[in-house]
Image: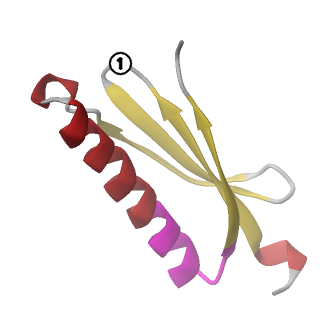
Amino acid sequence: MNGEKRCALGIDLGATFIKLAIVSSDGKVLKQGSAPTLAERGRDVSVGQIVNSAKDFLKSARESGLDPIGVGIGSPG
């Protein structure tokens, strides 16, 4: 696929929110959003929330004609 269509998913894990962004190969933020971590419901629910949010963002990128080539995750601790 054309290099101009390449993008990456960035995930910032916080205590109460998961922040996500699709970023182009030249660093431009193409889409951003957030979802609650649901940490009060336990680890499995939080991990599910991260996975589902990431899947939604990657699907949206592909539907927009982008080629996600990587994922970066920032986490405290």
Numbered marks: total: 1
Q: Position of residue 9 (x, y in %)?
A: 61, 54
Left/right placement of residue 9 relative to residue 54 reads right
Left/right placement of residue 9 relative to residue 3 reads left
Task: Determine whether 53 is above or below 16 in the image.
Answer: below
* Three-letter code, disc 1: Ala
- SS assignment for the magenta stretch, majority: helix
Q: Residue at x 52, y 33 (%)?
A: 12
Q: Residue at x 39, y 65 (%)?
A: 56
Q: Residue at x 85, y 74 (%)?
A: 4
Residue 22 found in image quarter? bottom right
Q: Secondary structure at mark 1?
A: loop
Left/right placement of residue 44 relative to residue 50 reads left
Mark 1: give few (<14), some (14-19) or many (20+) Cα within 10 Å: few
Looking at the rendered image, the quarter that the N terminus falls into is: bottom right
Q: Position of residue 23 (x, y in %)?
A: 69, 54
Q: Residue at x 42, y 23 (%)?
A: 14
Looking at the rendered image, the quarter that the C terminus falls into is: top right
Left/right placement of residue 24 relative to residue 76 reads right
State which region is magenta.
57-67
Residue 20 within the segment the image draws in magenta? no
Task: Determine whether 11 is above or below 55 in the image.
Answer: above
Extreme residue in the top direction: 77
Task: Determine whether 30 is above or below 17 in the image.
Answer: below
Task: Determine whether 43 is above or below 57 in the image.
Answer: above
Q: Which residue is mark 1?
A: 15
Residue 65 within the segment the image draws in magenta? yes
Say how the picture is coloured.
Answer: secondary structure
